[in-house]
Each structure stands twice: as structure tokens, then as C-alpha cells.
Image (tube, rainbow, N blue to C red):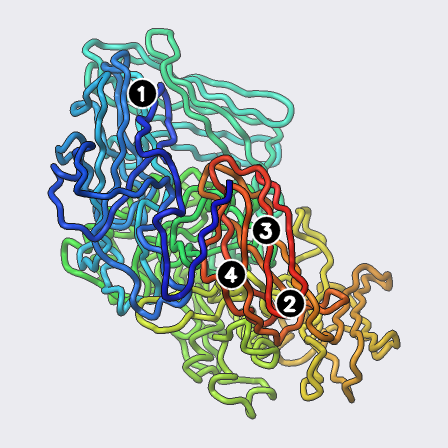
Amino acid sequence: MVKQVLYTVSFLVFTVILSSCNSTVEKVTFGDNLFNKHWEFVKDINQSIAVLSDDGNKDVVWEAISIPHTANIEPLVIKGKQWQGVCYYRKSFKVPKKYKNNTIALYFEGAMQVAEVYLNNELLYINKGGYLPFYVSLSDQLKFGENNTLLIKLNNEDNQEVPPGKAINDLDFNIYSGIYRNVWLQVKNPVHITNVLEVDRIAGGGVFINSSNISKTSANVNIRAEVINTSLVSRKVYIMAGLTNDENEKKNSSDVITLAPNESTVLTTSINIKDPKLWSVNNPYLYHGTVKLFSDEAEVDNQKIRVGIRDIEITAEDGVKINGQSVKVRGTNRHQEYPYIGYALSDNANYRDAYKIKQAGFNMVRLSHYPQSQSFLNACDELGILVMDAIPGWQYFGNENFQQNSLNDIRKMIRVDRNHPSVFLWESSLNESQMSDDFMKKAHQVVHEEYPGKYVYSCGWKEGVYDVFIPARQHAKAPFYWNNYAATNPFFIAEYGDWEYYAQNAGFNQKEYSDLSDEERNSRQLRGDGQKRLAQQALNYQEAHNSNLQGAAIGDANWLMFDYNRGYAPDIEASGVMDIFRLPKFAYYFYQSQTDIHAANQFAKPMISISNYYNDPSFLNVKVYSNCDEVELLVNGKSYAKQKPDADVNSSHISHPPFTFQLKAFIPGVLEARGYIKGKLIVSTKQKTPGEAYSIKLWIDESGKNLERSCNDVVFLYAAIVDKDGTVLPLAQNRIQFSVRGDGCLIGNNPINAEAGIASILLKAGEKANILQVSAEAEGLKQGELIVNVQ
């Protein structure tokens, strides 16, 4: 069976992308049911809730879809006209009568942005906010043993009371649409561990884990679990927590208490771990375990946990220390969008983004400018990436209701994300917004209420209130920026490398800068803007990062990792070190070269990259990025020079300066760069002068996760125009037509012109995909073919 969907700029069809059977009634079992399949969808209609809830009504044509889902496939460049409006999601399900006395609820990980939840035509709940989860109890309204109709009305139109609050046409990102994260139906025993959002108790809800008395020889893992009794009689309850490493399991239980009907309480226990394996950015060890709840000696509930044992101390004097060891925090910023599908990323797609961040040489990411998915944070836990978690906000400080909603977002964000060892800073600040002192004090207080104890740090872009001050580089003046700042509290440069260059106020030190046009000078460079401009972008980041390291900042985060769309501008914001399709620019290799090859992790490898296509006689500057001691450059097989890293004004403080070679002439052929460590050849790379276009080379980007069926998983499919030797033609713009055979589909502009020699599209696996046969063709070129194995 072939499922192929082709999109063009003027004809974007979404109705057949995500398929399921709309006549299916979901089967419900005890526990957590992933509730992503067998939904129906409709948008831009004017019908009553009663009509929409009626399964037999033929006036409305519903699309069969599954979650995650976007309400609108957007163009590649949105140009300030993202779809906004009202849409509806509907689902039929049946709960067996045997679960009548159980607690049954829905948990939405993310839906944009005001959600009204109806069950059997009755309004149950209204949630305001698209970036954080919400919990809806169904128990009182369910019809047991019969079909139930769930209806979700979503509205993503501008709303000044819902953070980020700012109208999308004035916003520096897009909020997109749909039920774009996982949905769960939870069927629990009347006595159970609460959902993290089920009970509104400060620092309560669900399971809360932290560690104390951490050393190389011992650590205490402290577990708090909020439990509730919804039965009609009192119950004797306790929890038993267990943690396992590669060798053994440690267990401990709480005291036994009597829990009255409709009462909730917090049970606590602690597990002492001898010789603990500590979590760090280079060794992100995670213990696995379970918290079990017993009621009258019978196990009635359990929750699986992952625990990273670590302490993090942040001071102005010593910077960031993890488990007593100083860490150079080298970070980036990330928006969670993909082209076309917006925020509707699979869990695997979120993991792949985290993988790319680590692979690029970063050990920290700021979630700009909103909380992101659990799957992304899970990946940061696994890969060893520090996270600055952030509430939704950007250059807007609204009315009293908005402010209260923002404070509520802080509470919810911490309750949802507090068990992630990767989170080291809580951005409880509305980015670049003129917040009142009263709001900031309350926000800081909320952080410490919700996460009592040590190793918790609030942060904000204004100084004086928060534990950590997080200005952008451009918030200070050139040429010194924050280098001479007398820090009383620790401060972290949360954005750099973009705006100061775009606004032309950088106070540059660069010789290369003087003869460039405005467009060439800044850091907003598309991958197709050419090697001269990509080299300038990389140099901008090097200059700013090197400058940041000369001050007292505890770390910095560049702006940013991936190109993205924004509401207020008619173009793609192109200051990413990778483009919107996750293809690297020269700046990517600069950051990758800063990786410490002595760190004990899979990403700490010797690397070398030539940032010159070797196709232009006017561009004779050859920049080689490497973390080696020496680099030798060979031209057409002959040694041109062997040298140490650069020692110029832009290389004085970075870990691994680049190696700059200035060629005297252009002789087409092959550049080869060889990297040496302590005199030994360790790594090498070649860049050939491209010849005539001959064929198309296809590949997909899996970044640590294979393409997976039956979960709306998507990967980037790339088609490169290459010569007979397989060298990409970096100036090629051939029009590429993609196709796929098998249970999968393509999402994106098709055909599409190549950019810098590579055309990109999204490839999505279907419900039963096993093998996908992908091809790409262009006039005058040998067709490219690829077999994709789907798991």
C-alpha cells in the first residue's frame, strides 16, 4: 500500500497525513493508557457542542487523526500569517463497568492554548495555557460500560491573559496549534499516588525526589509521594521505594498511616546509596526504580522513577559546581518547532534535537521561551545536558490575571519538571519584560516554595531579586559588555551572538568586518547565503563567546541552535548554528570543536572540519575547526602548512581556537586537514572542489533514535546534489521531487529547490511501516534511492 502526500507552497493538504479508524472505540485498561490514537479532528466551523458531540451527526466531516497533531500544516516560511482559530478534537471510548469505583482522569501534556474539555456534551474543565500539562478528572461524568464521547475545543487566538500574552504578530516565535503532545487516560485504584497536578498542594502532587548528603561514598535519595484515598472507608497505607543500578537494588518504606476517606497526605522515605554513581554532564548516570503504594498490605499503585543523584552549587565566586567539580557551562537556546508541523513533534523527534545539541558541543540548553516536553527533558537527563527551564514570556507584562497565570505557570512548571536532574535553573522571569518588583519577588518566592531545600536556583533577566541574573549580552554596552560587571549574585549570559551583530552595535574587533555589507555582517545567515557569510556568522559567535569568557559570567548560551519562524517577521530567523531542517552551518563546527576530548562521554571525540567549499578563487581563507593540538593543511596532496591554533584577539580565552590558513592561490582539487595530538595523527578530513552535478544522494537524520512506526514519528529526509565522486555541490539549487513507497508519507514543499546543494523534507512513518522505499529525482540527474528500515 502506498501513502504519499505531496505539498506545495500554494496547496498544503493535511487531511490524510495522520490516519486512524474513526469508528474505533478505545479499549481502556487499568493504569496509564497512552490515549493518542483514534481521534477525529475538524477546524474552522461554526457548530454547537451538542452537534459536534453527536457521533451520528453527518453535518460535520471529521478527519481521522492521531496525536501529536497540529491543527494546520504551515508553509516553510510563515511570513507572519500563522493559522489561528478554533478547532475540535473528538474521541469515543468505553470504560468497563469493573472500573466504576476507580479514579479516572485525562492528562494532557500540551494543547495550544485555551482548551475546553467536554465529556458527553458536558463541560468539565477549561485550561488556559499551551505550554504546560493539565489534568482533568472524568470519574463523576463517565458512563461505564457504554460509549463516551470526549470533545476538546481548542483556541490558539491571541489572548492577553494567557502567557506569553503578546499578540502573535508582535511575538518573536510562533505558538502553533493542536494537541501537540501526548495524551494519557489514567485509571487508578481509589487509593493511589496522585497525578502531579491532581492535588493543589505546595511542593506536592505525585512523586517528588531529591538527594542530600551527597559524597563519593554515600548519598541519600529522598522520596515524597502524595497519596489520596477516594474510597468510602479508611485505609492503612505506606509506600515502598526501590532503586536499582547495574548491580543491585536498594529499598526502603515509609511509616504506615491511616488515611481517611477523601483525604490526601504526603508519605516520605529515604534510601541510602553507598558509593553512588553520580549524575554529571559527562557521566549522566540514572538509577531506575519504582515507588509502590500499599493499602491494607495490598499493592494498589506504583510509579516508575529515574533518579540522577547530583548536587549543583552556583556561586559568583566559583561558578557552577556539580558534585564539587567545576563545570564550564557552554550552552545554546532552543525553540521546539519543526518546519511545517510546528510543535507536533514525536518523543523521538524531541530526543533527536537534544542529541544534536550534545553532538554540537553544548552541555546546556535554555528552553526559550517556554517549558518544553517531557521527552526533551528526558533526553537531556540521559545525554547530560543542563537545562534552564523557563515559563512562557517575551517582552510583555500583562494585567493582574496575566500575572497570576504566570505565577501559576511557575508552580506547575516546577511540579512537572522537578525530578529531572538536568534542570539546574528555573527561569521564573518573563523574558525582556518590564516586570514589577512585586511580581519578581513573588516569582522568586514561588520557586523556593515549590522546591524547598538546597540546589534550587531561580533566575531572571533583571538583577537584584533572583538567585541568578541572566542578562543577554546586548543588555550591556559595547565593547566590554559584561566583562567588567561587578557581580554580587552569580550571572549567566543567556543570549549572545545575534542581536548585537544584527543591530550593528557590537564594538567589533574583527579585521574582516570593515568591508562587509550590513547583510553580511550579522549572524542571521541562511545556509544558502554562501560560505563568506557563514564564515562571518561563525566568527561572530567565536568573538562573542571568547569575550564572554573574559568576565565573571558562570556560563553563556548562544542565540541559538536551530533557525525558526517568528510571528512578527516575514522571514526565517536564521541565527541558528543549524538551519530549520537541522543541517549544520560553519558555526556548528566551531562549537563542536570546543568539546573536551578528555571528557568521558560518547560525544567527547577528536574532530576536524574545513569551513571552505574550495570552489571560489576569491575565498582563500581556510578556517579549520578542531580540538587537536596541531593541524596540517595539505593542498592537492602537498603539505601547505602545519601550525598551532590561532592566537589572535578572538581566540584568547576559548578552549580550542580554530586554525586559520590563508591560501596564496586557488588550485582546484582537494584540501585535506590533519589533526595531531601530542605529535600523533588522530583525525583528518577532506574537502574536494565540486565537479559537475551527476546524481542525488539520499539520507535521513536519526540522531540516536531510529524512525519508529505507529507514533507519528518524523525524520528529516535529505537529498544532496553530488558529482561523480559524491561531493556536494554547495551552489546547486536544483528542483527536487521526493517520493515514498510503503506505509509512510512526506510532509513539506514537494518539489522543493535545493539550498546550498541539499533539499529537505519530512518523512513520517505510518502505523504499520516496516520498510520505506524513498527516492528523489531532478532533471538531468541520476535518481537517488534509499531503503529506510522502520522499527
Front position among marks 1 and 3: 3
Q: Residue 138, relative to residue 1: is it above or below?
A: above
Assign a secondary structure to mark 1. Answer: strand
Front position among marks 2 and 4: 2
Front position among marks 3 and 4: 3
Q: Quadrant of residue 788?
A: top right
Within 10 Å of disc 3 (Cα), the crowding (few <14, some 14-19, many 20+) is many
Can residue 118 be seen in the rendering of this structure?
yes
Nearer-N-terminus badge (1/4): 1
Which residue was labeled with disc 3? 774
Q: Amino acid at mark 2?
A: Ile
Please report contact status of discs 1 and 3: CB closer than 8 Å, yes or no: no
Residue at the spot x=48%, y=70% of the render?
A: 575
Q: Which residue is nearer to you in this view: 448 or 788?
A: 788
Front position among marks 3 and 2: 3
Assign a secondary structure to mark 4. Answer: loop
Please report contact status of discs 3 and 2: CB closer than 8 Å, yes or no: no
Q: Residue 601, relative to residue 569: is it above or below?
A: above
Looking at the rendered structure, which numbered label has been put on residue 784?
none
Q: CA distance from mark 1 to mark 2?
A: 55 Å
Q: Amino acid at mark 4?
A: Phe
